[in-house]
Amino acid sequence: MNEIVINNFRRIKPTMLLLPLCIIILVIIFLYWQDALNVDSYVQIQKDYFYFLNSKLSQFHSFEYNLTQFGDGLVFLALLSILIVYTPKVWESLFSALLVSVILSSSLKEIFSVPRPATIFDNDSFTIIGKTLTGYASLPSGHSITTFTILSVLLFLFMPKKAISKVLWTILIIIVGLIIISTRVGVGAHHPFDTVIGSLIGVFSGIAGILISRKYKIWNWIENKKYYPVFIILFVGSIVVLILKIMTVPLTVFYLAIISLIISLYVVTKIYLKK
């Protein structure tokens, strides 16, 4: 499987970065056309959409709350932890991509300083699921960036060879991503455009991460089994963090993440002890 990933690596071109950038430019043009390139107007033009989506999506309270956790890197990566053994190249790209995403997310949140829905709207006028998020870090949605960063890496690295399979695989990834990022509106944490822009930044980060890891080889040590103790420690630490999360909010997705980590911990430890 690692060979498939390596071959797909070679098909990724820097020009692919232009796609998410072009769509972001179109979004900016739309906002300009709507005279919404200032914070107040940006929030107001999507207020009705926010209320509509929030009212519809929040009806699935438990589902939304569980699904939105995929935007948490710890949870999503925990479910992919076993790939360290079978396709370490994926993790090389993920590390680079997530590093890019963190830099972009933190920088842009600081630059735009858009208030979250709970900061600017009456909290009794919409549904908030989970912790009430306030402040001025709504744009872009960090969970959306993380979701599409990871999904983009999986999209390109596991891309099938046949044309029809490529189309179906791409559609599947996009649909899954859109469902996940929509939960950020459903739980009352973000405005709709926050998630759209965040997803595009995520796609950019995912492609950039693949290109960086391919060119600079900074994560090649991941394949070396002598470094498995690093992952053993990371897995154990992640399990502890997830247990603490469960003690506060016992979500199903946290249990699934722990099970995935325990399996990966067993496999990695077994391989390391045999080397």
Image (cartoon, rainbow, N blue to C red):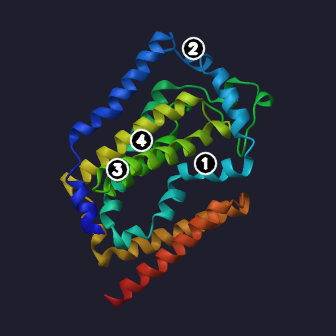
Question: Against 159, is 49 above or below?
Answer: above
Query: Which of 210/99 is in front?
Result: 210
- For the C terminus, which image quadrant? bottom left
Write down the residue under mark 4: 202
Indicate left or right for 172 with 181 as reference.
left
Q: In 3D space, how far apart are the residues under numbered discs 2 and 3 (Cα atoms)?
A: 42 Å
Write down the residue under mark 3: 164
Task: Where is residue 56? Give x, y as percent.
Answer: 71, 36
Indicate left or right for 216 with 58 as reference.
left
Label 4 SS: helix
Query: Of marks 2 and 1, which one's residue comes earlier in the chain?
Result: 2
Task: Where is residue 77? Give x, y as percent.
Answer: 47, 60
Query: Of marks 3 and 4, which one's residue comes earlier in the chain?
Result: 3
Write down the residue under mark 2: 41
- Circles 2 and 1: CB distance less than 8 Å? no
Count residues near mark 3 (Cα–Cα under 10 Å), then give few for <14, some for 14-19, many for 20+.
few
Residue at image point 35% right, 90% down: 274
Write down the residue under mark 1: 68
Q: Quadrant of residue 249?
A: bottom right
Query: Of marks 1 and 4, which one's residue comes earlier in the chain?
Result: 1
Q: Amino acid at mark 2?
A: Ser
Question: Against 124, is 152 above or below?
Answer: below
Q: Disc 3 vs disc 4: which is toward the camera? A: 3
Query: Of marks 4 and 2, which one's residue comes earlier in the chain?
Result: 2
Q: Amino acid at mark 4?
A: Gly
- Circles 4 and 2: CB distance less than 8 Å? no
Q: Amino acid at mark 1?
A: Thr
